[in-house]
């Protein structure tokens, strides 16, 4: 699978070397080397395209150290798409060096939902042999170190039943009041992490939609959006997952008002990156665009299309918990969503902003969480200290990748703050 959208040399020529991207760059902040800065990546990619740079192990190492946080794109006066050219070169890296066995296994499972379901249930049965579970915090500590997971690391754990297996495909509203020109039916795309580990998020979303008297559809054959494979350069897997999902979504897209997703990375992948990925497959691209028009991050759709704010305000429920909100890179920078979750939360909670809610949490993708974990750890600690400074009891973000990373960063920094998706907090306020 070859993408030929970006010309590295012309992007490199468009870089005016102003350096505005460097202070905001997640990797440059922890590895102060010009080579691992947006300007450096762009320069090196230009040289690679002109055959002046070999894609050797050193270059591989450099291009795999980008967190794909998009901070640089926002800061760049020329909007240069550093994140996308890194995504593109990672496919060349995958082709030249192959993909590690455990990532290949993971991507195989993303393509085969039934096997993943089976292994997840098996994992639920046996996970206590390897993990000490903290159900309150929905995290676990390994009992022993493994080559890719150190013992002191907080991890998510599998739930007994996945979200998709817990509910029927259609849940009809009880007291349905039909609004004019509205179908009043919403589909949920859950995302792999909320499907298998943070299942409370999906439970909370169902609860909110029931309170809003909407018909709910939980499409059972949905597959992973493809984001983990996309960020790793495993483009054959991405191509497979996108096309399977498009074919499936087309069977119900005209019946629903929206497909809502309580996950920033999955919603950004579906409503933006699918189109980028399919740029040279015109027919598939148009099909992806049609679907993307109905795909929204959950808080954005709920705030703009329902009476949820009113419902929360009228509940007169003030919950005595101080919340701080982290802006996932894929929510604020990619989808412009930051006001909506805050507006919903502030109806019932007190919000206190952290000093830099935009600062990337440091998740960075599968490679960053495995081979480059030390970078992820270093990028996560400042966020944990920032959360501590607010004295909040709960940190919230609409993203399970941020949840996994921030939960571990808080653990590493010995900061006792709980993490909740805003959807869980909103559902609690409706109790
Ligand atoms: S995407 Fe993030 S980590 Fe990568 S170059 Fe841009 S700012 Fe740096
Ligand atoms: S901000 Fe943009 S133009 Fe300026 S150095 Fe960075 S990539 Fe180049």
Image (spheres, grey):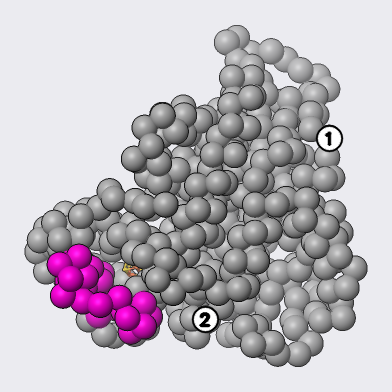
Q: 127 or 346: nearer the eye? A: 127
Q: Residues within 10 Å of mark 1 (few under 14, many from 20)?
A: few
The residue wearing badge 2 is 371
Q: From this viewpoint, is residue 412 visible? A: yes
What residue lies at 83% left-to-right and 57% top-to-bottom?
118
Q: From this viewpoint, is residue 18 visible? A: no
Q: Secondary structure at mark 2?
A: loop
Q: 263 or 304: nearer the eye? A: 263
Q: Residues within 10 Å of mark 2 (few under 14, many from 20)?
A: some
Q: 30 or 52: nearer the eye? A: 52
Q: 352 or 281: nearer the eye? A: 281
* Residue 147 picture location, percent across and down: 64, 87
The disc label shown at residue 111, or none? none
The disc label shown at residue 168, or none? 1
Q: Secondary structure at mark 1?
A: loop
| Region of the chain picked out in magenta, as a range | 35-62
* Residue 316 picture location, percent across and down: 70, 41
Q: Is residue 14 above or below residue 97?
A: above
Nearest-to-viewer mark from 2 and 1: 2
User: Which of the 4 quarters of the picture holds residue 427?
Assistant: top right
What residue lies at 44% left-to-right and 33% top-to-bottom?
284
Q: Is residue 169 above or below residue 363?
A: above
Alpha carbons under labels 2 and 1: distance apart:
39 Å
User: Which of the 4 quarters of the picture holds residue 193?
Assistant: bottom right
Counting residues from the start of the chain, the first of labels 2 and 1 encountered is 1
* Residue 202 picture location, percent across and down: 72, 47
Q: Is mark 2 within 8 Å of ligand 1?
A: no
């Amino acid at each position: 699978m070859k993408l030929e959208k970006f010309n590295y040399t012309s992007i490199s020529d468009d870089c005016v070397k102003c350096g505005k991207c460097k202070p905001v760059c997640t990797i440059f902040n922890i590895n102060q080397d010009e080579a691992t800065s947006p300007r450096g990546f762009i320069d090196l990619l230009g040289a690679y395209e002109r055959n002046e740079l070999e894609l050797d192990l050193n270059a591989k190492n450099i291009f795999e150290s980008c967190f794909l946080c998009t901070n640089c794109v926002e800061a760049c006066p020329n909007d240069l798409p550093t994140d996308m050219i890194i995504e593109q070169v990672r496919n060349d890296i995958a082709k030249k060096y192959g993909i590690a066995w455990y990532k290949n296994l993971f991507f195989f499972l993303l393509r085969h939902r039934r096997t993943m379901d089976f292994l997840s249930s098996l994992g639920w049965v046996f996970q206590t042999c390897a993990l000490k579970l903290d159900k309150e915090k929905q995290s676990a500590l390994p009992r022993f170190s493994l080559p890719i997971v150190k013992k002191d690391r907080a991890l998510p754990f599998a739930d007994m039943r996945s979200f998709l297996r817990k509910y029927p495909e259609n849940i009809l509203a009880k007291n349905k009041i039909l609004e004019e020109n509205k179908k009043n039916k919403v589909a949920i795309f859950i995302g792999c992490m909320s499907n298998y580990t943070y299942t409370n998020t999906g439970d909370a979303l169902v609860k909110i939609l029931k309170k809003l008297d909407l018909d709910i559809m939980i499409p059972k054959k949905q597959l992973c959006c493809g984001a983990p494979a996309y960020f790793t350069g495993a483009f054959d897997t991405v191509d497979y997952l996108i096309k399977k999902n498009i074919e499936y979504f087309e069977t119900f897209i005209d019946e629903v008002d929206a497909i809502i997703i309580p996950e920033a990375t999955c919603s950004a992948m579906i409503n933006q990156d699918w189109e980028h990925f399919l740029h040279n497959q015109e027919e598939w691209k148009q099909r992806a665009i049609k679907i993307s028009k109905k795909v929204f991050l959950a808080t954005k759709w709920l705030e703009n299309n329902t009476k949820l704010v009113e419902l929360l305000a009228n509940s007169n429920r003030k919950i005595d918990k101080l919340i701080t909100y982290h802006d996932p890179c894929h929510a604020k920078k990619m989808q412009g969503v930051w006001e909506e979750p805050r507006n919903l939360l502030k109806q019932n909670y007190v919000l206190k902003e952290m000093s830099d809610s935009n600062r990337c949490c440091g998740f960075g993708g599968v490679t960053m969480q495995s081979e480059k974990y030390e970078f992820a750890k270093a990028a996560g600690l400042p966020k944990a200290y920032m959360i501590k400074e607010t004295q909040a009891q709960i940190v919230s973000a609409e993203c399970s990748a941020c949840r996994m990373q921030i939960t571990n960063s808080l653990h590493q920094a010995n900061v006792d703050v709980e993490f909740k998706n805003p959807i869980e907090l909103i559902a609690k306020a409706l109790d």
